[in-house]
Image (cartoon, grey):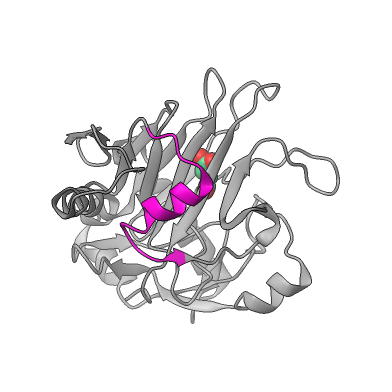
Amino acid sequence: MQINPLSSHTGAEVLGIDLTRPVAESDRAAMNRAFVERSVLVIRDQHLTPPQVVDAVGLFGTIFPQQNTKFAIPDCPQIHYVSNQDSFPDGRRYIPGDGWHTDHSNAVRPPKATVLHAVQLPDKGGDTQYANMAAAYAALPPATKERLAPLMGIHVYQSSHSARKLMGLNETDKERVPNAVLHPLVRIHPESGAKSIYLNPIRIEGILGLDHKEALPLLDELLEYGTQERFQYRHAWKPGDLVMWDNRCLLHKANGDYDMGQVRYLYRVMLQGDVPR
Ligand code: SIN
């Protein structure tokens, strides 16, 4: 097995491993170290069925139950799909993950990681972009760090301020999803100890104790700052990629910039995380 960096700060690719076969503990530990250090792990050349994806992600944690069961794969509901072939009820095409976010931050214990496995890709485009919010935090001026330190974000299923609308939940899913959850705006990574800016434009409704007039411009400013190109890694998908990213210290977004006559279809699963602190 070989692990190579994919940019100066984010991303590592893993070559020479077959996740359908037993993985040595030393290889598992090396991949997990690379995941914590590099935040995006790209395991190349995998061709996994949904049950094999379940087994493979078990190397890194426990599956987090997704909030919207609409996208579950019938024979293996722990695995969901991401596809450009679905539409909103009004007929508009639905591009999942289109817009910067971190996954399911409205959960009390949001998923530490999300895994996508490419099944079908367009010839060109459809990259996933990542913004390293730990690198962004580290580069903040001390006065801004001090200002952010006590602040708590209010996370909901769908923020009323978000330009991107999510697919609605069915009644059973609605009952399972928390109404509103507070998380620190700066969180400490439980494995690396690094601090990150923790926000989510799709789910953050405001900041506890701050007027919207103060909170919303601050959130916009942090988003613009944290998603600058210097903090980004952009993943151009290759057939067989299995990509696992760290939701605790990254924002990510999908790009609907390709020929919609072509199918983009990936398996998706998340791994349970801790209460952000
Ligand atoms: C997601 O946000 O989970 C999907 C990302 C992608 O499709 O690239």
As drawn, which residue projects farthest toward the bottom?
Answer: 209
Q: Is residue 127 shown above or below 242? A: above
* Place of residue 90 in the rendered image (x, y in percent of width and height, measured from the top left): 86, 46
Q: Is residue 210 shown left or right of residue 32?
A: right
Q: Is residue 218 shown above or below 49? A: below
Pick whichever, 132 or 3, lies toward us.
Answer: 3
The quadrant holding residue 65 is bottom right
Residue visible at 40% across and 40% down in the picture: 242
Identify the magenta region. Answer: 46-63
As drawn, which residue projects farthest toward the top?
Answer: 123
* Place of residue 38 in the rendered image (x, y in percent of width and height, measured from the top left): 23, 46
Assess whether residue 54 is covered by the magenta stretch: yes
Residue visible at 53% across and 33% down in the picture: 119
Residue visible at 30% across and 73% down in the picture: 149
**Number of numbered discs visible in the structure rendering:** 0
* Place of residue 74 in the rendered image (x, y in percent of width and height, measured from the top left): 67, 53
Q: Could you tell me if residue 102 is visible in this image?
A: no
As drawn, which residue projects farthest toward the left?
Answer: 26
Pick whichever, 153 or 4, lies toward us.
Answer: 4
Q: Could you tell me if residue 75 is visible in this image?
A: yes
* Place of residue 51 in the rendered image (x, y in percent of width and height, measured from the top left): 50, 51
Pick whichever, 212 or 182, lies toward us.
Answer: 182
Residue visible at 36% across and 43% down in the picture: 20
Assess whether residue 266 is covered by the magenta stretch: no
Q: Is residue 58 shown left or right of residue 13?
A: right
